[in-house]
Image (spheres, rainbow, N blue to C red):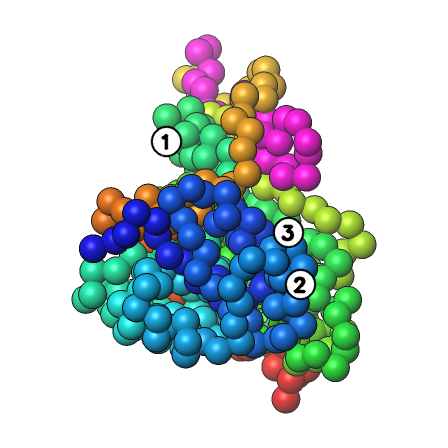
Amino acid sequence: MLRQKINVALIGYGYWGPNLLRNLKNRPECNVAYVCDRSAEQLSNVSDHYPEQPVTQDFNQVVGDPDVDALVIATPISTHYHLAMRAIEAGKHVLVEKPLTDSVQDAKAMVQAAAKRRLVLMVGHTFLFSPPVRKIKEIIDSGDLGDIYYVTTSRVNPGLHQNDASVVSDVDVIWDLAPHDIAMLLYWLGEEPDTVHACGRGCMRADVPDVAFINAGFPSGAIAEIHLSWLSPVKIRRTMIVGGKKVIIYDDTESIEKVRVFEHGAEFRENESFGEFLWSYRTGDVYAPRLENYEPLAVEIKHFLDCILSGANPITDGYSGLQVVRALEMANKSLLRSNNYIQEVS
Ligand SMILES: NC(=O)c1ccc[n+]([C@@H]2O[C@H](COP(=O)([O-])OP(=O)(O)OC[C@H]3O[C@@H](n4cnc5c(N)ncnc54)[C@H](O)[C@@H]3O)[C@@H](O)[C@H]2O)c1
């Protein structure tokens, strides 16, 4: 039986943790029981901003506390499985940052463990709560775009190589950036890819790919290309969705008109005089749909708390996290098989 407020512990207060804490503290139905980080320095940052906030370096104290209802886990990917499973086994609801885990096997175990105990398991695919991504889903589902032929995305920026070179990251560019694009593709298309190929290269460090190109094919016939890089001097977040009737261009770096719909298309038409079929290109209006204005993470956090209270299944549930990890794993295996990368690491 839940008390009036849901007692939540935040695990990990690095780059992303402060955003989660701010949004948790904004929710009236939530009490942040602990912020836990193994780094004392990170915890002193919490105390600087929120002097009253209980903090701890001891994860066992958090999972062992019967008053804690739920954990929000924002630690490096390689720690997700261990920390989330400990929480689930202790009967806590869990929101795990993206990607859910670093292997399909672990993701499946996590999903099963949460289902067995009827606990909410949610993954932080934050973009699925964002106004442009939701608007695009609405347009696709309305049939306005027609059949989706293909999708291209670019998610490039100066990346994690900016960090201290002695710090070994547990992610490469695929595991860092692709969860966003794969989660969006699966959400928009409503299907998982049946083929995923990737090539990439560790330009700065041979063992850590910092540029990658992923190609995916879907059962509907849609194909997708995802371009990822930590080596771009500028941040690009650009997606094009080409349908039979219309085309969407989504640029998340735009402050207004993030989504533009082009009433363009290519079609066959019959040549009346000769009874032949001809290609024709159609050009039409371009419009930018009105988008709501809210912080996606605020909606994500509210959704997690709502699901705990109602017992509903989250939009980004553990299973959707598993689907994304499956595509990531396929990309990773393909990357390791690709000639140029094997030469680099062998
Ligand atoms: N949803 C999004 O848009 C988004 C954005 C950025 C990062 N993320 C995700 O958030 C997670 C964290 O990323 P980050 O960039 O904040 O990483 P980070 O390295 O900056 O921070 C991780 C923090 O976790 C702490 N930590 C590590 N192991 C721990 C443990 N066992 N117990 C307690 N604390 C521990 C570290 O001390 C550090 O402070 C990753 O899964 C990442 O993919 C999501």
Where does residue 190 sit, x and y in percent of width and height?
A: 35, 44
Magenta segment, which residues?
A: 250-273
Q: Is the C terminus in the top left, top right, bottom left or bottom right quadrant?
A: bottom right
Q: Is the N terminus in the top left, top right, bottom left or bottom right quadrant?
A: bottom left
Q: What residue type is labelled 3?
A: Arg
- Find numbered disc 3 in the image and state the secondary structure of the residue it sits on: strand
Mark 3 neighbour density, 10 Å: few (under 14) some (14–19) many (20 or more): many
Mark 2 neighbour density, 10 Å: few (under 14) some (14–19) many (20 or more): some
Residue holding disc 1: 141
Question: Is residue 81 visible to the viewer in this orientation of the structure?
Answer: no
Label 1 near ligand 1 (CB < 8 Å): no
Report the residue at 77% width, 75% height from top. 164
Q: Give the mark, 1 or 3, whose residue is nearer the N terminus.
A: 1
Where does residue 90 sit, x and y in percent of width and height?
A: 29, 72
Report the residue at 56% width, 57% height from top. 52
Residue holding disc 3: 155
Q: Which mark is nearer the camera, 2 or 1?
A: 2
Question: Label 1 to label 3, Cα distance in Å?
Answer: 24 Å
Q: Which amino acid does label 2 sit on?
A: Asn
**139 or 109: which is nearer to us?**
109
Q: Give the mark, 2 or 1, whose residue is nearer the N terminus.
A: 2
**62 or 124: which is nearer to us?**
62
Q: In this view, does 180 lie to the left or right of 137?
A: right
Mark 1 near mark 3, Cβ–Cβ under 8 Å?
no
* Figure quadrant of residue 87: bottom left
As drawn, which residue projects farthest toward the top? 273
Report the residue at 61% width, 81% height from top. 342
The question of residue 269 being in magenta is answered with yes
